[in-house]
Image: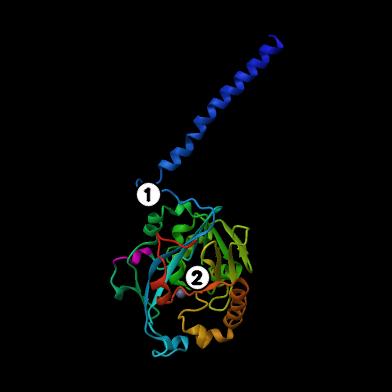
Amino acid sequence: MTRSSSVRLLLALALSAAALLPARAADTPGRVAARPPGLAPLPRVTSPRLYVIDCGTLVYNRPEDYQLTREQVADTNMSVPCFLVIHPKGLLLFDTGLSDRLVGRPLWENVDGGYGQIKFNTLRGQLADIGVTPADITYLAISHSHFDHVGNANDYAGSIWLAQKAELDFMFGAGADPAYLPLYSSLAHARKQVFAGDHDVFGDGSVVLKLTPGHTPGHQALYVKLARTGGVVLAGDLYHYAEERPLHRMPKEEESTGTPASREAMERFLREKNAQLWIGHSTAFFRDAIKSPGWYD
Ligand SMILES: [Zn+2]
């Protein structure tokens, strides 16, 4: 065999090896085909997009629990949104709302701590309307572990859970509420990134979890920097009723937890970033918001 013929042989081998590549790449269309038929394609973005998703309503008429009177609160019910961020580097689901299993159930079956839970549409179905399946969610984060924020957490245990250390300890420690634990128990086995403090989700400062303890030990809000809308902070339960903010009210028990300090720090952050505060439980916020499958960018 001449030197040139051995080079030709090597070339031929290399080419035939390359010819195998499309066969291996055929795995990818196979995975795409596994998506439910008719599902919209996963949105592709060049800057973050924020979706406001209807995750239920809490029927409640005791604003006194938040040191407000019925005269002060325009609507004592609470909206329950979930939020999806689609970033060029991945997807983040922030809060999972009331359980999808409540859809179609009568109100009297689902009263928890005086809060009646109403749910008209599933989170899973509304994500599908956007073109997103649970398998597409890169990261799951919850503002905190109360039932109206973790109702579907188990469905997203295949994502990477972005967890504040204090909330993780609260959720799985001795003080965990046995009534809520089944809603998120699968997260015990999820891949996790655990931190104590603020966390820059995609490493570019555009999507940042903000530690705001008080309502629960590891409560967190979410800052999203949007190209057209500007900076937005999703408050979680740092506030419930919008009226709490100008009137400086909060549940009595939170006066001695971190809530006052977390609110002060948040006000400074909002000024520094020139950002809006979105209070998810405010029915006025939710009524006026662009709902999914529409979005903010
Ligand atoms: Zn809540």
Label 1: few (<14), some (14–19) or many (≥20) C-alpha neighbours in 10 Å: few
Disc 1 + disc 2, Cβ < 8 Å: no
Q: Position of residue 31 (x, y in %)?
A: 45, 41
Q: Main secondary structure of the magenta part?
A: helix
Rendered image quadrant of residue 17: top right
In the foreground, 101 or 280: 280
What is the secondary structure assignment of the residue under circle 1? Answer: loop
Classify 10 Å Cα crowding around label 2: few (below 14), some (14-19), many (20 and above): many
Q: Farthest residue in the top direction?
A: 1
Q: Amino acid at mark 1?
A: Leu
Q: Which mark is residue 39?
A: 1
Q: Taking the image as drawn, is residue 216 in sight?
A: yes
What label does residue 145 carry, if any?
A: 2
Tell whether circle 1 marks a residue whose Cβ is less than 8 angstroms from ligand 1: no
Q: Could you tell me residue 54's position as x and y percent?
A: 39, 66
Where is the N terminus found, in terms of image quarters? top right
Q: Work out whether residue 14 or residue 287 is closer to the camera in this orientation and state it.
A: 287
Would you place residue 189 above or below residue 61 in this image?
above
Q: Amino acid at mark 2?
A: Ser
- In the drawing, does residue 12 fall left or right of residue 249? right
Q: Which mark is residue 282?
A: none
- Left or right of 249? Residue 14 is right
Region of the chain picked out in magenta, as a range: 100-104
Report if residue 103 lies within the magenta region. Answer: yes
In the rendered image, the residue lying farthest to the front is 228
Q: CA distance from mark 1 to mark 2?
A: 31 Å
Residue 180 visible:
no
The residue at 39%/89% (across/down) is: 70
The quadrant holding residue 256 is bottom right
